[in-house]
Amino acid sequence: MKGEMRSSEVKPIPCCIVNDHSDIEPFLLACIRAKRLSKRCVMVHFDAHPDMSVPTPVEQKYDSVLSWKDPHVLYYDVLSSEGCIGEFLLPMMYQRWLSSVIWVRSPWCDQIRDGSHEFLCGNCTVSDEHAPQGMGKGRDQCMVSMAEPYFLDEGVCADSAELKHARAVHLHVCPVEDLGSAFESCMQRAAARGADGADTGVDWVLDICLDYFSTNNPFLAPLTHALHTDGASAADVLARLEVIKQVFRCLSFRHVGPAASADAHVGSIASTSSSNSSSSNSSSSSSSSSSTSSSSSSSSSKSSSARARREQRAHCHMVLADVLLGAAASAQQSLSTQSTDKESFLDLFPPAHRKNPGSLFFDTVLPRMSSEARSLLHEMGSLVLLPHQHSSHQDMTKLVQDMRHQVSRLRLRNPHLTPPAAITIARSTGEASTHEHDDGFTMSGIVEALQAQVLEAVQEVLSGWYADEPAAPPSPPRSASAPASIPLTVHKFYETNQERPESDAFTQAYAVFLHPIAAGVVNYVAAPSGQDAGAGGLTQDRHPSKKSRVV
């Protein structure tokens, strides 16, 4: 039985610490290749961001789900843009390396509604002039059938009938207190769909981003500074910033209604291996997910709805550009022209929001914005809505404790649950840090202490994993049957390898499992519950380096 394991029988759990969150992707794929992790596993994703964005590769030829199969191409070519740190999960889910992702959101985050969401991901041919920014037209582009503001803001929402090579992916969103039920549901779903390793249970991954505990929006600081230029007080600037956020929250194309989420074909495609969608006249009910929308309208009407959203978004960007940049460039506009601009601007909002924030922004905030502030806001767009919460030390400690408690309870809900097959931690710090501006999602001033605190919490979870196993009668003294300690091997990919400065996350990840050249590896052994934390021991294992080409 797993509860009777002793330290000699427990395999060390690989743990990878990276800076850019997308760098965990090659590590997990190397784990799968080395048979340390099964395919179609479940990921528990503690983060302030879903990281479910559609990849936007630098070279457009890789902008297709067909480019996601090769791990080398995926890492170096598909995940090549500055935004790749939030684009790595969808390809892994599409390739069925991950069966489900449970996004445990920070308490202040609401980018995607709580609940279970099953939707389609595939290629959509965009032949009109309203292709998403940075994407071409008349060619295949990756899109999804989930009409949440998170995807609508990027212009990557399509209807199921528009998608080719479509596959269903599954995301569950919940706060930390609901992790237990979400985890149980996703593990059952993975087992029912034939996850690799089903004979011994479904593997799972514990993924933690440090910005879960304290979140920085690096795009806000420059805008906030620019709003201060007219001598406004801090309170006035915060009030203006809130109005600006409301402008982007209330745009009409983000609020068409849940019935238009275009998920009608999820069930039919998920149940077959076909790479294309069913006939446009077919209909199916929503899958078992609680928040997956259903629609009784025909697929042709839904197709026009998704296209209309993309057109509405493109028009919205055009009007915003004219309001922010055009007005700033022409201070001699006539009153009639300004009135026309205002009416066009107010048309971007549903009736309930034309006055607030529509008129409020146009009449009171916009005239006081400098040209620098307008230009920054035009560049940022909906990025102004990214979560921003600088937590106190006390609040961060409580969040770490809540995470440790809820992950530990997973074992209590399922006595046969094995520990996570792999653990990943992302620091998400930036490259520049000053007193006024930090360009990372985790503030550089707290990252070291927070990382140590999180790693300690993970060790506590592992040290007590088998502590509640009942001993077979007659019961020996508890000290004589102490639960097995679980070794944790930590690979710090964010540190520069002095012996191999050219190495990146991909080469380091494959080196860990395929070549004995993992420099900077730290082995932690979690002490059994009830014993001194240092009893498990700490060793540092540095292997000689050698150059080799990863194939």
Image (cartoon, rainbow, N blue to C red):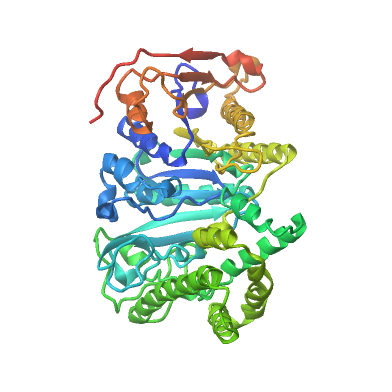
Count the marks: 0
Determine the residue positioned at 34% across, 48% down: 96
Q: Residue furthest bottom?
A: 336
Residue 473 pos. (x, y %): 60, 23
Is residue 540 at all visible to an observer of this figure? yes
Determine the residue positioned at 54% across, 84% down: 337
Relative to residue 271, is residue 439 drawn left or right? right
Q: Quadrant of residue 97?
A: top left
Looking at the picture, tell me which residue is in the foreground, 480 or 51: 51
Determine the residue positioned at 51% across, 13% down: 539
Q: Quadrant of residue 238?
A: bottom right
Residue 85 pos. (x, y %): 45, 45
Is residue 114 at all visible to an observer of this figure? no
Looking at the picture, tell me which residue is in the foreground, 191 or 527: 527
Residue 114 pos. (x, y %): 57, 59
The answer to whether residue 276 is above or below residue 523 is below
Looking at the picture, tell me which residue is in the foreground, 343 or 213: 343
State the quadrant of the C terminus.
top left
Looking at the picture, tell me which residue is in the foreground, 477 or 99: 99
Residue 143 pos. (x, y %): 36, 62
The answer to whether residue 506 is above or below residue 105 is above
